[in-house]
Image (spheres, rainbow, N blue to C red):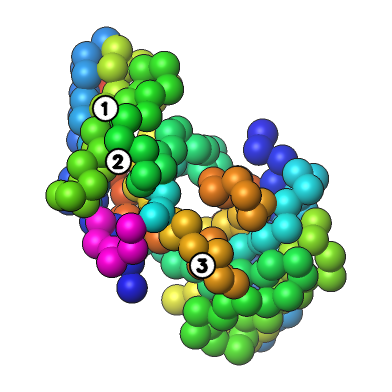
């Protein structure tokens, strides 16, 4: 079974600075997806960024980028120019690319609470 | 707004009550999920439905009973719950060829 580990329960960053959230995962599969989701106090889980395992290039979405190290099974999220609205719980998640009834499920880490200080 | 709507947003129920949580998606997705989010624990998958058929039950106690009448609606029927069932219940949906899931805002359930 796949597992996702986020070793930083809490992180803080100053507004306008850069922060990196860590995520490692364990899988025997070669084809899969990795995600970072953000959950603000409103509770809605919002997709931040997605990475396909077969792609060597790291995904980027505006101020958000990832460092995907497939061999090391590491998937960190970098937030540049942090804003107050970035404060939230961040969850790393894994999904198999094999479609076998139920395998579309997401496996989540425990989350990292990010605080942005003005 | 992700296109997935959950009602109610908050629910307080006694251990002998029967209540239902509702999830609706207007995204044309074929898969729907129930997740449980408790404090200090990872999100736990409860049920998966693909094209209205249940494809996964993650050893969920029978006091939780899901129902998926069509690809757009998903219910979670609750009866004789325990205080430890208090949690945020999240519904999500996805499409087979699109890997990410879209989540609702959740129902905060408190069992008293």
Query: In percent of the image, x 30 and y 35: which residue is there?
Result: A56
Which of labels 2 and 1 is toward the front? 1
Residue B67's spot in the image, x, y percent?
A: 75, 74
Instruction: Tell me the SS state at disc 3.
Output: loop
Q: Is residue B41 left or right of residue B79?
A: left
Instruction: Tell me the SS state at disc 2.
Output: strand
Badge 2: how crowded within 10 Å, few (<14), some, or many (20+)? many
Residue B97, placed above or below residue B47: above
Residue A100's spot in the image, x, y percent?
A: 55, 71
Residue placed under numbered mark 3 in the picture = A103
Residue placed under numbered mark 1 in the picture = A78
Residue placed under numbered mark 2 in the picture = A113
Question: Visible in this render: residue B85?
Answer: yes
* Magenta residue check for B81: no
Please give the chain letter of the residue carrying mark 2.
A
Query: In percent of the image, x 18 and y 50: which residue is there?
Result: A71
Which of labels 1 and 3 is toward the front? 3
Part of the protein shown in magenta: A25-30
- Quadrant that contains the C terminus of chain A: top left
Badge 3: how crowded within 10 Å, few (<14), some, or many (20+)? some
Which of labels 2 and 3 is toward the front? 3
Please give the chain letter of the residue carrying mark 3.
A
Residue A81, placed above or below residue B94: above
Q: Is residue B111 left or right of residue A54?
A: right
Badge 1: how crowded within 10 Å, few (<14), some, or many (20+)? some
Of callouts 2 and 3, the N-terminal one:
3
Dots 2 and 3 on the same chain: yes
- Quadrant that contains the N terminus of chain A: bottom left
Residue B65, placed above or below residue B90: below
Q: Is residue A22 left or right of residue B107?
A: left
């Amino acid at each position: 079974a796949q597992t996702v580990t986020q070793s930083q329960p809490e992180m803080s960053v100053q507004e306008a600075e850069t922060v990196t959230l860590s995520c490692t995962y364990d899988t025997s599969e070669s084809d899969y997806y990795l995600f970072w989701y953000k959950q603000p106090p409103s509770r809605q889980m919002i997709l931040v960024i997605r990475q396909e395992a077969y792609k060597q290039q790291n995904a980027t979405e505006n101020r958000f980028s990832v460092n995907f190290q497939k061999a090391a099974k590491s998937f960190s999220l970098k937030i540049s120019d942090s804003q107050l609205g970035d404060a939230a719980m961040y969850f790393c998640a894994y999904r198999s690319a094999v479609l076998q009834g139920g395998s579309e499920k997401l496996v989540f880490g425990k989350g990292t609470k990010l605080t942005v200080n003005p | 707004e992700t296109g997935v709507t959950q009602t109610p947003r908050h629910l307080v129920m006694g251990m002998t009550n029967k209540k239902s949580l509702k999830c609706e998606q207007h995204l044309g997705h074929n898969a729907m999920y129930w997740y449980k989010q408790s404090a200090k624990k990872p999100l736990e998958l409860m049920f998966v439905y693909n094209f209205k058929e249940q494809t996964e039950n993650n050893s969920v106690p029978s006091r939780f009973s899901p129902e998926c009448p069509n690809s757009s609606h998903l219910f979670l029927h609750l009866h004789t719950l325990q205080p430890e069932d208090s949690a945020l219940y999240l519904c999500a949906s996805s499409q087979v060829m699109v890997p990410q899931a879209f989540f609702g805002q959740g129902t905060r359930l408190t069992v008293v």
